[in-house]
Amino acid sequence: MSETGTDDFSPLDQLPGDLMMWVLIVSELLVFGAGLAAFLGVRITDPAGFAASQDLLHRTAAGVNTLVLVTSGFLAALAVRSAEAGRIGATRVRLAAASALGLVFLVIKGLEYLEKARHGIGIETDSFFTFYYLLTGFHAAHVIAGIVILGLVGIRCAPRTVEVGAAFWHMVDLVWVLLFPVIYLLR
Amino acid sequence: MRALRDPLIRAWAWLIALSAASTALAVAVSQGLLSGRGVTLGGAAILILAWAKANVILSRYLGLAQAPFWHRGFRIVLGLYAVLLLGLYLIA
């Protein structure tokens, strides 16, 4: 409040959740954003090679993983709503369901990596697969971190902590919806 | 249909629909159903769908719909970023 009694409105007051979580979200988006722009930048030098390597990816599995992750994000958002209503049991169930779908995502991703390894495809195969492993691997590491965070906020269940944990999970979701089309779909 | 009045359920339904549309477009391209300029337009459409999905997540899942100042800022930056990706895609 100012001395005149009128509100000193700050845009920061509008921001939902925790400011530090938004700083983390923006920094992660910048890192992945730079990675995806670099991917498309290098693709300019060899579009045919990138298309040939992309054909070795399993688009349908990645599409299923997109559905899994956005549904998981939906459950995390519902968990925030139940936490705000003081329904601890429902909050924990929804967080657990969101985490379980995170595990499904990782299993599908793991099977995809396994299939690539069986065909002798690794991080050094070509530029496409270098970016593929770096970007999807870094994202998968965030999924693991997100599952741990959702577990922790489920234990220390309070509206504020659940909101912060869910925000991290939505960031993981947001990165995937940008990463999926650029790496798996664009021809 | 009453469930779709809930903004969260509506957001989830949009995300599912947009993701399915992206995958369908990509499958159409990879199976040769689109060719020539159609492939490029399909790619541009896939990027626009990704931009739309990111906006839904920001506004509904992350709650920026209730913070118009930040929502506008994120939409502008995300829009510029989508244009950058589109440019890099079209140059190739």
Image (cartoon, coloured by chain):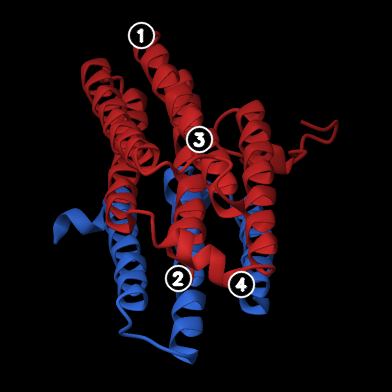
Chain colours: A red, B blue
Tag 1 secondary structure: helix
Classify A62 as above or below B38: above
- Distance, label 1 to label 2, CA atoms, is 39 Å
User: Which chain letter goes with mark 2?
Assistant: B
- Which residue is labeled 1 in the image? A155
Give me the residue at 44% from left, 88% from top.
B38
Task: List x then y, in percent, for residue B80.
Answer: 69, 66
Q: Are marks 1 and 3 in contact (CB under 8 Å)?
A: no
- Distance, label 2 to label 4, CA atoms, is 11 Å
Asked whether B23 or A118 is in front, the reply is A118
Amino acid carrying label 1: it is: Ile
Which of marks 4 and 2 precedes in the sequence?
2
- Which residue is labeled 3 in the image? A137
**Do marks 1 and 4 share a subunit?**
no
Which of marks 3 and 1 precedes in the sequence?
3
- Which residue is labeled 4 in the image? B89
Task: List x then y, in percent, for residue B75.
Answer: 61, 60
Q: Are marks 1 and 4 in contact (CB under 8 Å)?
A: no
